[in-house]
């Protein structure tokens, strides 16, 4: 009523001068009354949000003296007895006993909470098990309602959240060095984080902080000018950057005269010498071409902001840090000490007046927080660099750069979030760092192409045996999709913080938790949908839209396999929401594999195209279509292109 009167007052304030004031009074009264109204469950959240909300109301009603205690609810493996479990009771029993409450056991606490569950259309069969576990099922009508939303939307919807500007710093190879296996994890994990944030509706900056500046360029420039005196008029065809770097480094280590000249060329480069700049630009251009080969294979988009981009910003940032007292002179160097948390300082200006990585990274943070006005900055590097970035983050917070008002963002906005995603090393099957047989670092292009070659060879063998119906051209496409996808998935399915052992045989296995198995499952699903239309005249997409519009009516969930599949499909919102929050990208892999397994169980136990009735065929085709949509999203988030047939 207040809202309607307010609208009327705004529309005709001249004709009804008292309406707007009356509406305002009603609005104030409404706010006052709300304090005494029962709390309501917000059904717009994820499944776990809704269940948690219901149990939170029950907990607060059962034990109002425990105000502020958060209800712990978790999904359980799909079974006959429960969908979710609340595990607060045992811990609350101990808390209540310390307060002198008359409680006998965790089970008694659980039963009181169960008795306080308010009437609602979301959960049913709320029961106590064992020493105090509270099991509950989702109400059939609520499950059907959520499935309908999935069907109507043609797949999962992005999580509801305020749009943010999020910067992801990842990949970051060095100029004049080819990308190697060490760059694999940052590139793949960073891309998945970007895809996830883009799906969530955020404005994502995909930053490639390449190493295009530093003392190493002096030796490279000097070496090139010695080897190619007419370099400007006759540019050399340099394809092996690694060999070039090794030759220059060998001369630098063994020839004192060359070392002196190399250092002089660093000074010339930094001073803007035209000839040195041209050679530097040539090295950057050649490197960029090599980087692009990797990014094209992996279907990854990045925007380059190298170290050189921040050079002009460094002096001003250092001066500001010095004036604010955050940086101080120590033995001629300008340092940021943050004891006792960190024993070593950040050196933002060296004693000789030069700048290093600390200087560049602080300038980059200043630019990202205050010029770009990012709400969240995520750095994806190896775990060994974690402390360095934590030191930079803390220094930026000390300077107040993360504060919204200071950065020029809306004053009421939250402080910017600075995060580091660290990852372990890629190992060989011997448990040591992954290298070639000769002990060289494995080039990333070679590693990727070998995965494609091996899977292509396996497909051609199957085709020769009559077990694969793909044409030679289709085999090439399939080999690329699965080969590159297998490398990505094998990396992403591991917790980023851990090391993992690289194995072509394991990643290309058709069984188990591999990209090959996932592609076979997706291709089988797609084949069923195609056959449904071609052989039965049943359009899965049209039926999905119709059943979605009808609130899920027509979808049969009477068998355990059907309901288990539906429940797994509906977990996708929670998976996405949690991963956006904590950046544990391996959760998406776990979910995709679990979903593929649930679908395999479904088609094994429930005939789709040979079901008993036309209605059942349509229902199971709709579940197949929904599975395809959710799997497809997971593949996209992981940067993989699934196969429609294999």
Image (cartoon, rainbow, N blue to C red):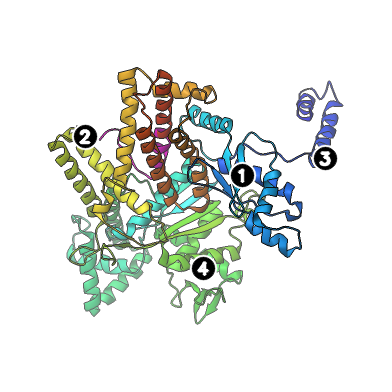
Mark 3–mark 4 Cα distance, whole angstroms, equals 47 Å
Residue 93 appears in the rendering: yes
Quickly name the residue at label 2: 474
Q: Earlier in the sequence, mark 3 or mark 4?
A: 3
Q: In this view of the protein, which residue sits in the foreground, 510 or 259?
A: 510
How would you rate the neighbour count of disc 2 (Cα within 10 Å): few for under 14, some for 14-19, many for 20 or more? few
Magenta-span inclusion, residue 143: no
Give the foreground label among 2 and 1.
Answer: 1
Residue 127: image tag: 1
What residue is at 20 percent from the left and 33 percent from the top? 470
Residue 539, given in percent of the width and then of the height, sits at: 38, 21
Q: Earlier in the sequence, mark 3 or mark 2?
A: 3
Label 1 element class:
strand
Quickly name the residue at label 4: 391
Does the CB distance between marks 3 and 2 fall below 8 Å?
Answer: no
Quadrant of the rendered structure where residue 427 is?
Answer: bottom left
Quadrant of the rendered structure where residue 622 is?
Answer: top left
Label 2 element class:
helix
Residue 5, given in percent of the width and then of the height, sits at: 79, 26
Q: Earlier in the sequence, mark 4 or mark 1?
A: 1
Mark 2–mark 4 Cα distance, whole angstroms, equals 51 Å
Quickly name the residue at label 3: 32
């Amino acid at each position: 009523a207040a809202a309607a009167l307010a609208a009327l007052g705004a529309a005709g304030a001249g004709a009804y001068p008292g309406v707007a004031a009356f509406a305002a009074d009603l609005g104030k009264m409404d706010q006052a009354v709300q304090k005494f109204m029962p709390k309501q469950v917000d059904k717009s959240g994820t499944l776990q949000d809704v269940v948690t909300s219901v149990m939170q109301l029950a907990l607060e009603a059962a034990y109002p003296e425990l105000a502020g205690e958060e209800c712990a609810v978790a999904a359980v493996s799909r079974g006959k007895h429960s969908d979710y479990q609340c595990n607060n009771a045992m811990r609350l029993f101990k808390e209540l006993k310390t307060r002198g409450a008359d409680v006998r056991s965790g089970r008694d606490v659980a039963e009181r909470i169960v008795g306080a569950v308010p009437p609602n259309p979301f959960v049913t069969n709320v029961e106590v098990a064992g020493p105090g576990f509270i099991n509950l099922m989702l109400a059939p009508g609520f499950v059907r309602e959520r499935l309908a939303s999935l069907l109507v939307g043609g797949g999962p919807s992005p999580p509801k959240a305020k749009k943010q500007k999020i910067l992801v710093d990842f990949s970051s190879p060095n100029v004049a060095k080819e990308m190697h296996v060490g760059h694999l994890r940052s590139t793949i994990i960073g891309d998945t984080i970007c895809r996830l944030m883009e799906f969530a509706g955020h404005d994502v900056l995909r930053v490639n902080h390449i190493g295009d500046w530093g003392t190493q360029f002096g030796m490279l420039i000097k070496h090139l000018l010695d080897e190619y005196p007419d370099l400007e008029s006759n540019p050399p065809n340099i394809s092996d950057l690694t060999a070039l770097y090794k030759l220059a480094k060998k001369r630098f280590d063994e020839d004192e005269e060359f070392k002196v000249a190399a250092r002089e060329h660093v000074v010339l480069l930094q001073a803007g010498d035209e000839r040195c700049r041209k050679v530097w630009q040539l090295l950057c251009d050649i490197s960029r071409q090599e980087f692009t080969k990797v990014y094209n294979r992996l279907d990854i988009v990045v925007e380059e902001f190298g170290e050189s981009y921040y050079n002009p910003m460094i002096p001003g940032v250092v001066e500001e840090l010095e004036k604010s007292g955050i940086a101080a002179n120590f033995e001629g160097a300008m340092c940021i000490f943050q004891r006792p948390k960190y024993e070593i300082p950040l050196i933002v200006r060296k004693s000789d007046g030069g700048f290093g990585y600390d200087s560049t990274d602080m300038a980059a943070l200043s630019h990202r927080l205050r010029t770009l006005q990012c709400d969240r900055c995520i750095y994806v590097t190896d775990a060994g660099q974690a402390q360095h970035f934590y030191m930079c983050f803390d220094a930026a917070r000390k300077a107040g750069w993360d504060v919204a008002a200071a950065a020029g963002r809306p004053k009421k906005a939250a402080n910017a979030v600075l995060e580091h995603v660290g990852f372990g090393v890629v190992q060989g099957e011997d448990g040591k760092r992954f290298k070639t047989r000769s002990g060289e670092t494995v080039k990333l292009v070679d590693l990727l192409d070998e995965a494609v070659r091996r899977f292509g060879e396996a497909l051609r063998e199957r085709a020769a045996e009559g077990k694969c119906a793909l044409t030679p051209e289709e085999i090439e496409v399939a080999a690329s999709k699965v080969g590159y996808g297998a490398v990505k998935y094998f990396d992403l399915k591991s917790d980023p913080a851990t090391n993992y052992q690289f194995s072509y045989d394991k990643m290309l296995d058709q069984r188990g938790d591999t990209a090959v198995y996932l592609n076979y499952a997706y291709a089988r699903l797609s084949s069923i949908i195609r056959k449904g239309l071609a052989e039965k005249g049943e359009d899965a997409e049209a039926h999905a839209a119709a059943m979605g519009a009808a609130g899920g009516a027509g979808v049969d969930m009477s068998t355990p396999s059907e309901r288990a599949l539906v429940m797994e499909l509906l977990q996708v919102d929670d998976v996405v929401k949690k991963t956006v929050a904590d950046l544990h990208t391996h959760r998406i892999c776990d979910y995709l594999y679990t979903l593929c397994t649930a679908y395999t169980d479904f088609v094994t136990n429930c005939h789709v195209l040979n079901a008993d009735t036309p209605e059942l065929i349509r229902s199971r085709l709709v579940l197949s279509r929904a599975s395809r949509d959710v799997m497809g999203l997971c593949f996209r988030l992981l940067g993989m292109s699934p196969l429609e047939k294999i």
